[in-house]
Image: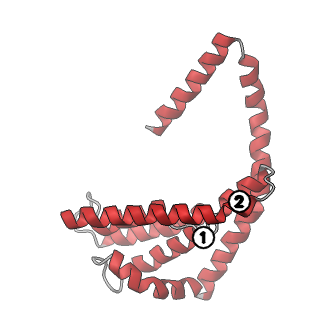
Amino acid sequence: MINFIWFFMIAISITYALLTGNISIINDEIINSGSKSFSLILEMGPLIILWMGILKIAENSGLLEKFAKLLEPVLRKLFPSVKKDSKALGYIASNIAANSLGLGSAATPFGLKAMEELQKENNQPDTATDAMITFLVLNTSGVTIIPTTVIALRMASGSANPSEIIITSLLATICSSTAGLLLDYYIRRKK
């Protein structure tokens, strides 16, 4: 579906440029977008690498495991159907830690491992469990304390104060997480 949407947007843009005689703008953008993308990668790369390294150090040192133990009472409430000795809760906690630092790319492997562990406990492999749905809601709307990727994008774009979005980002993600989890809880109770 997303491929269709992108194709549709590109086709409309090219058609409009042809009809209005602005095809040179599209040519310029095609040529310049490659170098802009490469520059963006070079500017964002070090910051993302730094935070992913810190996260890897936290994982190797056992800090993420301690974080999982800290979150265990909350995760038990959110995921009551998950077995007590399941590795899924550790992966979920690690995913939450990475997402709270705004590192979606670092959170993805933990999220995939969490889903894999949750699938092992699933009696109906072709249907998502309540725990899987709750995790998906939590992962999608997760609270971001430090929006690292957005700050890096703002820095790359020349923002005068790239970190000024921390408070608004925190408030927005708290609201989205709360709304998502309340809706998930309501639907789960309704079933």
- 114 and 21: which is toward the camera: 21
Disc 1 residue type?
Ile
Q: Tags 2 and 1 in contact by the CB under 8 Å rule?
A: no
Q: Is residue 72 above or below residue 159?
A: below
Q: Position of residue 145 (x, y in %)?
A: 60, 70
Image mark for residue 54: none
Q: Quadrant of residue 59?
A: bottom right
- Residue at point 63%, 66% (across, down): 167
Disc 2 residue type?
Ile
Q: Position of residue 80 (x, y in %)?
A: 29, 78
Task: Mark yes or no: residue 122 visible.
Answer: yes
Residue topped by disc 2: 151
Which corner quadrant holds the N terminus? top left
Residue topped by disc 1: 145
Which corner quadrant holds the C terminus? bottom left
Q: Residues within 10 Å of mark 1 (few under 14, many from 20)?
A: some
- Residue at point 37%, 66% (across, down): 181
Does label 2 or label 1 sit earlier along the sequence? Answer: 1
Q: Is residue 51 above or below residue 137?
A: below
Q: Is residue 20 above or below residue 94?
A: above
Question: SS at mark 2?
Answer: helix
